[in-house]
Each structure stands twice: as C-alpha cells, then as structure tokens.
Image (tube, rainbow, N blue to C red):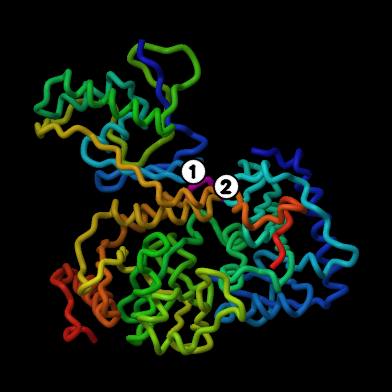
Amino acid sequence: MLKPADAGLESFFEAGAREQAAAAAAAGEHERMLRFADCRLRLRFAGSALTDLVTTAFAPRLVEDSGTADATIGLWEESRVPGGAQPVSWTEADRGARGLVGGAEGDRVVAIHEAGSMALTMVDRDAGELLYRIPDVASLPWWERAAPLRAALFLALGGPHRHLVHAGAVGDQQRGGVLLAGAGGSGKTTVALASLEAGMSYVADDYLLLDTEAAPVAWNMFGIAKLDAGHLARFPELALETTISAEPVPDEKAALDVHRVMPRALASSLPIRAVLVPRIRGGHARLRPASAGEALLALAPSTTFQMPFDGGRVIGALAAVARAVPAFALDVGDDPSELAEAVDRVLDAVAAGREPAFEPISAGAAR
Amino acid sequence: MAPKLTINPQNVVHETIDGETILIHLGTGTYYSLDGVGAKIWGLLAAGASQSEVATDVASGTDADTAAVEEAVESLVEELLREELLALAPGDPAPGDAAPADSASESPSLLAEPEPAVVVSFVAPVLRKYTDMQEFMLVDPIHDVDVDAGWPHVKAG
C-alpha cells in the first residue's frame, strides 16, 4: 500500500481545500446540513448544480443548519475550478481496493478515488473534515447520482457502533423492521418495493446506517430507490413515478424518489427485529428458516467488498446483529404482494415470540 | 517439524457464529464458509494451535481413527494455505507449535481440560468458496478510462 507521505496526501488535501474554496468563490457557495442518527454533517458546495443533485438524494436527511456539525464535507466539480483542478498525486497502480489510497492504521489523511465516477473523497481524520471532488455533474454516472457520497459517509459516520451497510430495511413503527441482506440482484429492492406498495415503512433498499450500540437500529440515508427493468415490470404503478437519464447507458437503473413520491412511507429509522435473506426463485414466495451464519454470509461480504475502507472490521458488528435477532430466508416468487405478506409474517411472529409459518404464501393469503 | 501457522492478518477477516465460520479475503474478493468440524478446526487454528494439536483435539471428539482425522486436517490446512487464508508464520519452524493468531469469536479453548466428550461421527471438513463478488476488487474498468489521456481521465460521453 502506498504510504501517505509518498502520495503527498496531506499536502494534496490542503491544496484540495483551497481548490474547493476557489471553486465556491467562482460558482457560489451553498451550505446544507444533514442529520444521520445523532450525527450532523455540514456540506459546503461550490455551485448550485452539485447542491441540487446531492440535496435531492439526501432530501429526507436535510435539517436546519443550526449549531455545530460533527464533520464538514467540502464538495466541488473539477470543471468549476478557475485555472483547472490539480492532478492527483498518485498513479493508478497506487490505488487499492475500491480506489483506496493510503488508509493504514494511523494515517491522518486517506483518499478514495473511485472507478467509473472518478469521484475523489478525502478525509482528514484529525480535523473531521472531508472533501468530495467529481469531474462535473453532467458526467456523473447514474449510480453516483442516486446514492452519492457513500465513501465520504462511510468515513464520516462510521464508528465502533455505527456502520454504513449494504442492506435494505422495511417494516413499521409498531413491530419494527427486517434487515434485507444479500448481494446485488438477490431481491432486496424487490422486497423493499413490495413492502412499500403494501403500505409499510421504508428505510432503504440498498444502503443504510446500522447502529449496533444496543439493539440494532437501521437508519435511512438516501431518499432514492434504484429500479432495474425487472422492478419496473413488477411494479408498474411505482414505475410511473421513476425517472431515468435522457440517454441511459446499458443496465442503468431508474430512480424512484421515495421521499418525494411517498414521503410518509419513508422512515428515519426502524429497530431491527429479524434478518431476511431474499433469493430470487419464482413461483410462490416462501419463508424458510435460516441460520445466523447464513445471515452473516449474506450481510458481510457485500458490505465489506463494496466498502473495504475499514479493513473489514464491520464483520464484527454484523455478526453481533446476526446473533441478536433471528434470520429467515425468503424465496422471492412472482407475485410481489406475497413478499409483503412474508415480511408481515416475520414481524408478527417475532413480536409474538414464535416461528413464522413456513408454507408457501399464496396470493390469496397476501395482504 | 511442523511449521507455524497464522491467519493472514493483512487480508483476512473472519467470524464464527453458531458453529459456522465466515471468512473474507479482502485482497481477492473471495469469501468462504466452514461449518461443523471445519469451523472447529478454524477456531483452533485461530487460537494458535498447530496442525498436530488440531488433529489431536478433533480426533478426541469423534469416532474416526486418528490417521483419517490427521489426513483431513492436513488437507484443509493445505487448502487454507493455498487460498491465502492461512500463512506460514515467519521464524523457525517449531514442533507442535503455532504462532499467535488474531482472535476469533467463539474460538474453542485450546487444549483446555477435556470436556466430557460427546463422540460424534466424523465428517471431513469442506471449505465452501464464493467468487461472485470478485468484480468489486477490480481496480478500474478499462472502458471507463480515456485511452488517449490515460488514467484518471474519464472517457468522454
């Protein structure tokens, strides 16, 4: 791994902060405050285009800008820098997993230079300051538009008991929620959308903040769900509310702004009562018993490989969740309404301290 | 002279939960699971046991003969080394010895006073390997880079 001193990370961070200030002076400075659980982040933007993009993605988390922030993120576009942005001080070969530059224990400054989006995230751990630079808003890939700042939030919000996790969460305030665990394509979004359509509360379909200090709690991060072609076909009413780029790239997902379209369904947080591991099967939906190991197998690798910036330490917290609540597998069938029934069965059963029924769910039994 | 074994500390994270072990190799994007006797063997290795100590411990709780258990443990250790989940510890080999490994939750107590044994049928351990997430470890898709300007310049359009 490249040593920070060799990459000039600390001086690059300082130059980046000056660059952001110059871009803000030229394009106009905008500030917004976001709140995630008990953590407040102040965002300082250069220009309105980036402000609008990020504000839309984090609309549910916007709060009045009062008091102090736990961390500050300076955001700007390279295209807005008078005289041009400074080139990075490292090479492609210096970048580790997911674009990590530096990052050894004790490094003050860490950089994450992501593939595809070329978004550059830097953190000065001592100062609690972060920087987020992108080439320009117009060229930002769809996935970064729908869920921006993931690396920055991982670094800013993560702690011994708080983790950015690749998972979904749905449920209701009375019974709590289920944590939807699995890799991309496993059915997390399908179950989340089915639950949303059935009137349940939605925290996330893809990324959330997991608090494990006491009983696990899932916190909302983004207001946008991402729907692929299969989701659009399964959920035609929700599909009507989605947007997609004017010239979508292959496999681009459509964005459903849950916060705008169904604001009352979006929950800030839900206590987690069970882990649900969906898997696409066809036929009728069906719950099956699952071991804590299966839950961890569904939770830990996808989170760790997508965001390996803490050296995989998140696995300990995820194991604690898998030990704390029961786990069930969910065969995702063809009828979305059966999936909401499955979530209902789990939450009812856990609340009553019993096992849910494991026979196949027929559409007639669904809500 | 048995070599000292250690968990690959730079690249491997692991947890054992209800008798199932999940192992993640951060360098390759591959993850693994072990259960039954395999999870027990991993727990003993993580606690610092040598290969021979592991075989002795495992054999004492099963109906298999010692030679069969030794062969199964050796085979699993070789596979764990091949997958770079285990590494040979630096330093001189020591007979029946092992380097301290990082802690694993629910590790069996190493060579503690034997518990009243429940003898079970021996089932050779199987290391399940999952490679579906290796794509996350690719540094940079070639097609995203402007071939004329080079990295980190993104291809226009």
**How far apart, in angstroms, are the residues tagged by discs 1 and 2?**
8 Å
- Residue A257 versus residue A72: which sits nearer the camera? A257
Q: Nearer the viewer, residue A141 or A22?
A: A141
x, y percent for residue A334: 26, 76
Residue A289 in the image: state x and y as whole percent. Answer: 20, 61
Query: Please, which chain is the residue tagged with disc 2 on?
Result: A
Left or right: residue A217 compared with residue A110: left
Q: Are marks 1 and 2 in contact (CB under 8 Å)?
A: yes
In the rendered structure, the answer to whether residue A291 lies left or right of residue A247 reads left
Q: Residue at x 49, y 38 (%)?
A: B11
- Return the x and y of residue A195 as percentages of the image width and height: 34, 80
Secondary structure beneath dot 2 equals helix
Residue at the spot x=69%, y=75% of the render? A67
Which element type, helix, strand or loop, lies under badge 1? Answer: loop
The residue range painted magenta reads A309-313
Residue type of the residue flagged with mark 2? Ala
Vertically, is B19 above or below B110?
A: below
Q: Main secondary structure of the magenta part?
A: loop
x then y, percent, for residue B100 = 42, 26
Q: For the residue carrying disc 2, how many other residues have a C-alpha within 10 Å: few (<14), some (14-19), or many (20+)? A: many
| Circle number at residue B26 | 1
Residue at x 62%, y 68% (from the top left corner): A141
The reply to whether the magenta stretch includes residue A312 is yes
Whether residue A16 is situated above or below residue A353 in the rendered picture: above
Residue furthest to the front in view is B148
- The residue to which callout 2 is attached is A97
Q: Is residue B124 above or below residue B98?
A: below
